[in-house]
Image: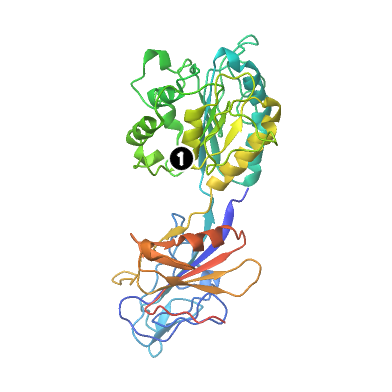
Amino acid sequence: MSLTLLDLSLVLVGCGSTEATPPRSPMSGSTVAGAGGSAAGAGAGTAGQVAIAGRAAAAGASGAPTAPAPVRPGQTAGRGGPATDDDAGTPSCGSAHAQAKLVKQPVDVIMILDNSGSMDDELRSVEANINQGFASILQQSGVDYRVILISQHRRRDRDDTSVCISAPLSGLAQCPADEPVFSQRFFQYSVEVGSRDSFDILLDTYAPPFDRRNEEEFGNAPNGWSAWLRPAAKKVFLEITDDDENADVLDFLFALTELSPENFGADPNNVTFVWHSIVGVVQKAQVADPYLSNEPIENNECDDVKNAGVAYQELSRLTGGLRFPICQFQAYGTVFHQIADDVAKSGDVACDFDVPAPPQGQTLDLGKVAVSYQPGNGAAQQVFTQAASAAACKGSAFYAADQRIHLCPDTCTSVRSDAAAKLDVLFTCENTITLR
């Protein structure tokens, strides 16, 4: 399975104030002003290669990564090896060229299921649809996902308001079962979730010490459900309940961000997670249509529920999540499909990349960077302009900060929507790129 969305060609050309013959860029026929050598992307003949976005650069002709050779003024880099002096053939300052793959950000889905007595039909519908309507859609999307279920596991057929997840998402061949079996994609913190205490359960079971009532019943999570979170993953919550929450939404946001700013954001007014809700809200004309985050709270209830789940609705609105009616459990397949689609979008391509290390003894001027974009449909190449900062972003632009290159919001949107896009990022002594 390939998660590749974009090819990123990154060329380091010319360092410090060195002046030399202009090199060739990896785009056929284009020229970049400044010192360096050939950047034609000829594979093993490249003068040197660097690691981009945490991935090791491709090996040189010998099979091992090669460091860029230094180039003195007046020298050029040939295709067949390191840069050499035109007169003496002495290795000198040169160029470094590497290709990297940009992949979708992984996503951790934290699913909270109400185990109260009124949730029998809903939980059976979750069991029937979570594999086909949710996990399979995520699998097809190519996103690296993980489901962390917080709800009581169903051991017997008569455990009406517990839940048992079978293969292929979990490691269980069939349900019910004595205890849950984890897989690469599935983990379960088995604890009873009441009608109105999801927020407290999430906070109390995140990490030790635990209230004894909230300890994982099989001893599978001695360090809490936080042990299953991945640092680089986008966090997405999914609440399924026919009731509302006792705790205040803002209090919960403050507590969650204080508990783990690295996972949920440091600012409760600007969190980094999304919260989807399947609650007692009245259905729309099309029963599986969601309420969007820009739509107001809906106070009308669907049939046979206690309330419209206003607290969870508000949390969805604040975090850009979707809201669905819990009463339409026969439509859960469609609902899970839509949530899975939204989760897959959460794992979008990152719009920033590491700046590579320059050759030893040299420095890079981040003010002299060129970024070009080749649309996947074969349209003409575009050159993105460099903004002075994130605040100065407008139109098709990028900026450099914290030793990283960041695409501005409009630029990022364009690149993300083009699955076959290619970017060339050129580090040079001049902020100049001539297109073919």
Q: Is residue 117 visible?
A: yes
* The residue positioned farthest toward the top in the image shown: 158
Relative image position of residue 429 (x, y in whole percent)? 37, 78
What residue is at 53 percent from the left and 76 percent from the top? 40
* Residue 230, image quadrant: top left
Relative image position of residue 287 (x, y in whole percent)? 69, 33
Badge 1, how many Cα within 10 Å: few under 14, some, many 20+? some
What residue is at 59 percent from the left and 14 percent from the top? 118
* Residue 143, image quadrant: top right
Secondary structure of the residue carrying numbered label 1:
helix
The foreground one among 40 and 112 is 112
Q: Is residue 234 visible?
A: no
* Colouring scheme applied when the structure was drawn: rainbow
* The residue positioned farthest toward the left in the image shown: 361
Q: Which residue is mark 1?
A: 318
* Residue 147, image quadrant: top right
In the displayed structure, 401 sits above or below 113; it is below
* The residue positioned farthest toward the bottom in the image shown: 87
Relative image position of residue 376 (x, y in whole percent)? 63, 66
In the displayed structure, 233 sits above or below 57; it is above
